[in-house]
Image (tube, rainbow, N blue to C red):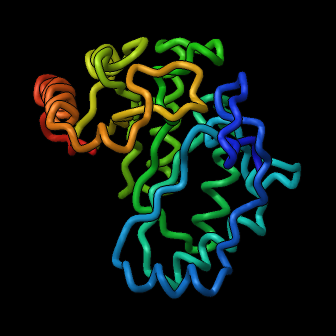
Amino acid sequence: GKDWWDPYGKVAFKTTGSYNPPPFDFENEKLLSYTKKLCPAYLSIGGTKSDEIHYLNEEEGNLTQEMWDNIYEFLRETNCELVFTINAGEWDLENAEKFLSYSKEHGYRIKDFRFGNEVNSFWIRGLNLQNYNQNFLEAQKLVRKYYPDARLIPISSSYWPLIGEPFPVFEEFLQTVALNENAISWHYYPQQSKRCLVATKSANKYFNLYPSYFDEFGKLSDVVEKYRSDYSPSSELW
């Protein structure tokens, strides 16, 4: 229900796009049938708009109680494990606790959480790494209160060909916040579509077959792996 990338390729001068899709239908019978064949698997709910929505909120563009109940019924029927991204862009402790408390009371299993999506872009929201670090520690305590076996996975920085991590925060976060037996994640964009206002490698179906594309990924994954081994060797890398 939030604005998103236009399916017809129109460029919007926003962080995403101007297309307003309907809420996802988790009761779709074909989706249920196909997903059951793929499981056991993880379902990740997150992305750019996860840092704008509020929980158990009936206003348009938020995660309503009915939506959340439908999502969990889908998980129950398909036997998927859930990784859920908590809103770090507009961090609201009271709303997050309301969501976790409701979920726990209803027996909703959440395997792991992420805290924010692509935190290296948070400067657009007027947030800096110090804000994020403080909020992460607060959110970590909250998750442990309701889901003590779940991890709160930080950062999820975006990496682009040629330039790596724009507006880097990954290493500084790991230097500042101690992570023990957690997980750290990163996103790699091998090319960017014409809808994106900035591109280091514009999308082309032929380029993906070039060996240099795979070499570029290898170089950047080595950088992230070094961060993990230097600062949080007991954590998984996603």
Q: Quadrant of the C terminus?
A: top left
Q: Residue at x 59, y 21 (%)?
A: 197
Locate residue 220 relative to residue 107 in the image: left or right. Answer: left
Q: Residue at x 70, y 43 (%)?
A: 6
- Tell me if residue 181 can be seen: no
Residue 199 is situated, as x and y percent measured from the top left of the image, at: 47, 21
Locate residue 11 relative to residue 34 in the image: left or right. Answer: right
- Tell me if residue 147 can be seen: yes
Q: Residue at x 36, y 58 (%)?
A: 149
Residue 3 placement: quadrant: top right
Locate residue 10 relative to residue 123 in the image: left or right. Answer: right
Q: In this view of the protein, which residue sits in the foreground, 232 or 238?
A: 238
Residue 201 is situated, as x and y percent measured from the top left of the image, at: 38, 25
Q: In this view of the protein, which residue sits in the foreground, 164 or 162?
A: 162
Residue 132 is situated, as x and y percent measured from the top left of the image, at: 51, 22
Residue 160 is situated, as x and y percent measured from the top left of the image, at: 36, 25
Picture layout, residue 102 above or below residue 75: above
Residue 93 placement: quadrant: top right
How many badges with numbers are in the image? 0
Locate residue 145 relative to residue 87 in the image: left or right. Answer: left
Q: Residue at x 33, y 23 (%)?
A: 177
Q: In this view of the protein, which residue sits in the foreground, 234 or 3?
A: 3
Most distant residue in the front direction = 206
Picture layout, residue 56 above or below residue 129: below
Picture layout, residue 103 above or below residue 30: above
